[in-house]
Amino acid sequence: MPQVETNRPEVCQLFAGGEWCEASGADRSPVYNPSSGEVIAQTPMCGAEDVNVAVDAAANAFPVWSETPPVERARVLFRFKMLLEENFDGIARCTTREHGKTLVESRTELRRGIEMVEFACGVPSLLTGETLENIARGIDCETLRQPLGVCVGLTPFNFPAMIPLWMYPVALACGNTFVLKPSEKVPLTAIMIARLLEQAGAPAGVFNLVHGGRECVDALLAHPQVRAVSFVGSTPVARHVYETGTRHGKRVQANGGAKNFVLVMPDTDVESATRGVTEGAFGCAGERCMASSTAIVLGRAAEAVLPELAKTVDQMKVGPTDREPQPDMGPLITREHRDRVARLIDNGVSEGAHVLSDGRRVEVNDADGFFLGPTILDHVTDEMIVAHEEIFGPVLNVMRMDELDAAIDLINRSPYGNGASIFTRSGKAAREFKHRVKAGMVGINISVPASMAWFPFSGWGDSFFGDLHMQGKEGVQFFTRQKVVMSRWFGEGSVWNPR
Ligand code: NAD
């Protein structure tokens, strides 16, 4: 595993054609430990030269890997899964160190990522096609699923272990080769996991790793050997990746940003709703595309739930996550992002929101990290900037309304459509919400309905660009193309051509 010294931050290496190597250029971007504010590594900002080396390696490995029987490809993934389990705590610590989320949160995301590897291990069953005999007299028809070639993964900072694992285990299982470009803010977890895949026996060139930002991404999007691109990140970049990738003739799936609503009905169980909204809004310090960033409280739910919510939030401990005891919530990813979120809170207040809990006043001793406490803004209205902009921090907007219909209409006016949840005891209200709400993932008494490996991660609207989502059977469809074969054999001895 790479050792990173605090006082001499190591420059991360690339992995291409089975070799770990230095990037060709000299540009670097700092990687922080957000709990301490220290620079712990440097990410090389790769350009077209490094991209060409990695894509060529992937293209060269494709002919043999794609002809390797699916069960043999699955065996590499079984070994990979065992190595991920053996190194579980080390990986979680690495994620916490470079990202800042708590150890429990790092373990949870890794568990979700390992489930994707487990899903991909079933690839011999997942790739089976369909057959119909006698589609016409003496003619049979079958479908085959074949890999695409070199596939690319571009990932955000907020799930350094899980999101890359949404992509390449399935892509590789289906017979593709892969180039991953993780977020320049969190390259260390991706490197640690890549070393385990190498150890598991993935042949040279089957999996490759490059680093960087826009220049690197644009070189990958324009490369003629790249067949498909999976992207997860903010909506403006998702749109750019989708438009540029498809213009270059690639298949693209691009998950974007979000603004998710949780609707609290007057009949809700107060304790469950309070716990759900708190976890939904402040888990991973709100840096989640499925964060419940807006609670719509209906009628008397406001009097019942809001005091409990403020009490729970004010008891949350915020602090460094790179040591014991662990806090309830860690820092944000960078100083700039923390300051941006604080400015958005100021903005909400100046537009008339009431502060129910104020995270700007948080004090953390013995750590110079990027901290901001959990914040609740009450009486947020549809005209305010905080009501629309993705904050991506520990801020919960509360909107007060009276009617279920009006609340669903408000949710449906959002350009995003990742997740939406309802807390209620009423089957009728839940059914109405589930049916009418314009969001790809819906929770009923669950605040973060992020789907798991076996189901698609199913954003709508500006939260997703493309046709086939990540995870589940749609993931397999994305990383394969279908062939339909019709066959007829000549000769005597059939019903149609008796001897
Ligand atoms: P980001 O869009 O800044 O970066 C994502 C990736 O794109 C990174 O690899 C980055 O290096 C690259 N990138 C950044 N700017 C680019 C540009 N101009 N051109 C080309 N590539 C560029 O996102 P982030 O800040 O790392 O992550 C947070 C965002 O990701 C939030 O908006 C969040 O909602 C979203 N997200 C969405 C999902 C989902 O499944 N819908 C999941 C997690 C995060």
Image (tube, rainbow, N blue to C red):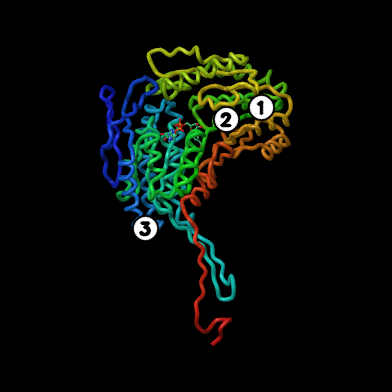
The type of residue carrying mark 3 is Thr
Residue in front for this viewpoint, 285 or 482: 482
Gap in angstroms between the C-alphas marked 2 and 1: 16 Å
The residue under the point 39% across, 34% down is: 213
Q: x%, y% of residue 414? A: 62, 32
Residue type, mark 1 in image: Val
Of pointers 3 and 1, the one earlier in the residue sequence: 3
**Is 192 left or right of 116, judged from the image as shown?**
left
**Residue 364 quadrant:** top left
Task: Tell me the number on the disc at residue 264.
Answer: 1
The kind of residue tagged 2 is: Lys
Which residue extends farthest bottom?
499
In percent of width and height, residue 236 lies at: 50, 34
In the picture of the structure, the residue carrying the numbered disc 2 is 259
Q: Residues within 10 Å of mark 3 (few under 14, many from 20)?
A: few
> Which of the two residues, 56 or 7, is positioned nearer the viewer here?
56
Task: Tell me, yes or no, if residue 331 can be seen here.
Answer: no
The location of residue 457, given as percent across then percent down, is 53, 41
Name the residue beneath numbered marker 3: 68
Which residue is nearer to you in this view: 120 or 414?
414
